[in-house]
Amino acid sequence: MSDSSDERLDQEIEAALDGVNLQELDLERQQTEDKARDANLVKGTVVGVTPPDVIIELGPRSQGVCPLAEFEEEPAVGSVHDFTLVGHSDGLSVLSMRGAMEVRSWLELERGSNVKCKVTGVNTGGLEVRVGSHRGFIPASQAAIGRVEDLSTMLNETLVCEVMEIDRSKNKLVLSRRSVLAKEADAARSEAVGTLTPGSKIRGKVTRIESFGAFCEIAPGLEGLLHVSNFAHTRVEDIAEHLKVGEELELMILDITEGGKRIGLGKKQLLPDPWDGVTARYSEDSVVIGKVTRIMDFGAFVEVEPGVEGLVHVSRLDIHRTSNPAKVVSIGEELSVRVTEVDEPGRRLSLSRLNSTGALIGSEDAADAEAIRAQLDTSDASPRGLNLGALLKRAMEDEES
């Protein structure tokens, strides 16, 4: 864990503990533990078993008794165990093996170790828990990977948590369930990622939709991103109009990076590519009807079929030279265009808009036609019977002059 992460965690813990007195969670238990930690751990040797007690020798001329019920099985004479001193009775020390186990477990706790705990209470800062006979605390931010709206739903649950902070002098024990869950998710991710390869097909469930795409769960705890550009061959502005949370999809693994923390998914890759065979469908000089989908400074993109767009350069958009394509065409407008170049491998289609005579705008034919039209517009001042050849000749002379 980085220093910055540690600092953020310390801030979260301090905020969660604000107004919470851990020592008051169980004062009586704390006093017992303090007393045990001071000097009550002692070693003793079993010298006899007289149910319901076990006779323990603590040293020369010093004996004690411990309830047999505190042993998992009847101890062997001569075996050595740890005990805590509970009191005295009839000249014998009253001992506890369970108390020694509790003290030892407390002393052996260290930051980063995992422990089982039971949720015993809830407050505004988080969860009160018990680790054996010890009290601990889980800040709300550490109760789960995501936000838990109602912490009371976790009452009486037994959790595995990581020790985040321990201060024996203050009887302070702070735990994190989120840390354990995150590590489990990382392990599950690593295992699942090992079975994935780019190009393979997989089913995923939509878990979250953003403006840039949809997150899909492809294995327990493992998500990938279906970017909007990889959803369909046609342009999609708002993927939320096509998907909903919980929907299942057939997807392709596109890439796996950062050990599986980033997985790229695709849907359009499993669909027929509209560019396949485009050369056969759109030969050069063929005329098609298309719809304007995008307007840029350098021209307009025209969709001639779903998923196939071509570019009409600004010089071939209008008979009058323009530097602003948006002034001569609009999004959604249908245009009659002629295919001037097809590059199937490069997925490029060059188009030119046609003028009213069917000539390519910007071509010599279009220029000649416009010159003829200009002469016809002034025909009232011209001699009757002027033929087309004469008009073309005059137009060409006007251009040369």
Image (cartoon, rainbow, N blue to C red):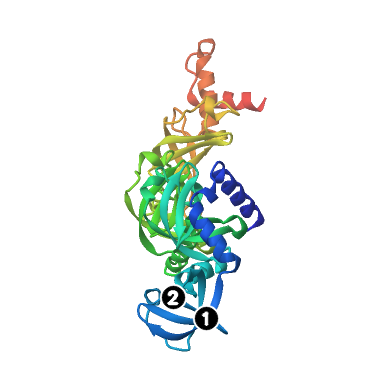
Task: Specify whether residue 88 is in view.
Answer: yes
User: In the displayed structure, would residue 353 be above or below residue 193?
Assistant: above
User: In the displayed structure, would residue 2 be above or below residue 237?
Assistant: below
Query: Residue 159 location in percent, x, y?
Result: 42, 59
Query: Residue 28 location in percent, x, y?
Result: 49, 54
Q: Secondary structure at mark 2?
A: strand
Few, some or many C-alpha atoms within 10 Å of disc 1 (few <14, some 14-19, many ≥20)? many
Quadrant where the N terminus lies?
A: bottom right
Alpha carbon of mark 2 to alpha carbon of mark 1: how far? 10 Å
Going 47% across and 17% down the picture, which residue do you hit? 385
Going 45% across and 36% down the picture, which residue do you hit? 293
Q: Answer whether labels 2 and 1 touch (C-beta < 8 Å).
A: yes
View extreme (top): residue: 381
User: Label 1, on which residue?
Assistant: 44
The tag earlier along the polypeptide, 2 or 1, is: 1
252 or 84: nearer the viewer: 84
Task: Specify whether residue 363 is in view.
Answer: no
Mark 2 residue type: Cys
Going 46% across and 47% down the picture, which residue do you hit? 229
Going 48% across and 14% down the picture, which residue do you hit? 384
Mark 1 residue type: Gly
Query: Residue 98 location in percent, x, y?
Result: 45, 70
Query: Residue 145 location in percent, x, y?
Result: 47, 52
Q: Secondary structure at mark 1?
A: strand
Few, some or many C-alpha atoms within 10 Å of disc 2 (few <14, some 14-19, many ≥20)? many
User: In the displayed structure, would residue 27 be above or below residue 351?
Assistant: below
Quadrant where the C terminus lies?
A: top right
Quarter of image, res 194: bottom left
289 or 333: nearer the viewer: 333
User: Label 2, on which residue?
Assistant: 66
